[in-house]
């Protein structure tokens, strides 16, 4: 397992960064019980990567190869495993966000109902970069499932000092544009850092530890570190891991 740890100062806080280039189901069991404050993941959707490429209707010459997907037969067990491990390592006052498309959302929802988590909110992220379709409605949203344990941290005025101004930010439909990375090396699917930072601010405090076991290109890590949170990132794809190293450690990446 390729693991790299680093401590540095971000947002007036000393933060700890731990990166793992390995299968998450090998790394998660090594993390102690009730040691993580927030989990935020964008797991594989259980659809073929080439279908993602077609639907996005974009130039994918810079997209990183080696994306690991799970078959429909594997998806229920895959989902059960990461949700069970997540519950174990989260503190009692913590929470988890799962970002998903609609294709296999039913497997995730069924697993959550059978777990010890409480599904506190089902949020919608609406974006202005719809997928390309000809014979069906255009998809322009993702689902964000907000799972909690006993008494989760929730900073209801996280985005404003003025409580009256901040009230509207907590609507269950979040409208944030998707980001364009034209000409840059990237993963098939990358979240806008504004969305990730928003979720982290509401559900954790400076000095807390945020974990992403499907770290992709490192967006969760960049958002967490920038606002004074510790970060644990796990990514099995070696090429994606190199991108995370460049983004979070400043290492050069070969094209």
Image (spheres, rainbow, N blue to C red):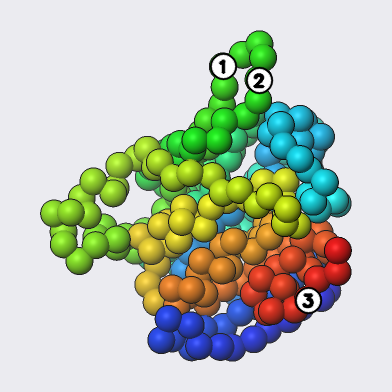
Left or right of 75 on screen, residue 100: left
Residue 57 drawn above or below residue 43 = above
Q: Is mark 3 on a helix, strand or loop?
A: loop
**Helix, strand or loop for disc 1:** loop
Q: Nearer the viewer, residue 227 or 5?
A: 227
Q: Where does the image place residue 98, in percent across and percent down from the top left?
A: 54, 48
- Counting labels gives 3
Question: Real-space Cα distance between discs 1 and 3?
Answer: 41 Å
Q: What residue is shown with label 3? A: 252
Cβ atoms at labels 1 and 2 below 8 Å apart: yes
- Toward the left, the furthest residue is 164
Mark number for residue 133? 2
Pick the residue in front: 229 or 162: 162
Query: Are circles 3 and 2 on residues that touch, CB within 8 Å?
Result: no
The relative height of residue 108 versus residue 252 in the rendered view (above or below) is above
Q: Which residue is drawn at 72% across and 73% down?
A: 246
Residue ID for mark 1: 137
* The N terminus, quarter of image: bottom right
Residue 172: x and y in percent read: 35, 40
C-alpha separation, residue under disc 3 versus residue under disc 2: 37 Å
- Asked if residue 174 lies left or right of residue 237, the reply is left
Asked if marks 1 and 3 touch (Cβ < 8 Å), the reply is: no
Q: Which residue is drawn at 13% across and 54% down?
A: 164
């Amino acid at each position: 397992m390729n693991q790299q740890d680093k401590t540095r100062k971000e947002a007036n806080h000393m933060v700890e960064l731990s990166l793992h280039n390995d299968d998450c189901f090998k790394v998660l069991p090594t993390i102690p019980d009730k040691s993580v404050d927030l989990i935020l993941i964008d797991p594989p959707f259980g659809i073929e990567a080439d279908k993602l490429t077609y639907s996005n209707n974009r130039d994918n010459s810079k997209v990183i190869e080696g994306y690991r997907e799970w078959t429909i037969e594997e998806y229920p067990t895959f989902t059960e495993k990461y949700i069970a491990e997540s519950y174990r390592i989260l503190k009692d006052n913590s929470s988890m966000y799962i970002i998903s498309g609609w294709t296999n959302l039913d497997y995730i929802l069924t697993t959550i109902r059978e777990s010890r988590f409480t599904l506190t909110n089902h949020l919608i992220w609406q974006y202005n970069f719809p997928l390309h379709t000809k014979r069906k409605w255009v998809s322009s949203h993702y689902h964000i499932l907000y799972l909690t344990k006993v008494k989760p941290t929730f900073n209801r005025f996280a985005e404003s000092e003025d409580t009256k101004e901040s009230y509207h930010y907590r609507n269950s439909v979040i409208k944030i544009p998707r980001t364009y990375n034209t000409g840059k090396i990237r993963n098939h699917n990358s979240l806008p850092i504004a969305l990730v930072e928003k979720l982290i601010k509401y559900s954790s405090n400076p000095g807390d530890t945020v974990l992403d076991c499907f770290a992709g290109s490192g967006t969760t890590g960049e958002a967490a570190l920038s606002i004074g949170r510790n970060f644990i990132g796990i990514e099995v794809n070696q090429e994606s891991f190199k991108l995370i190293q460049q983004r979070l450690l400043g290492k050069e990446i070969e094209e």
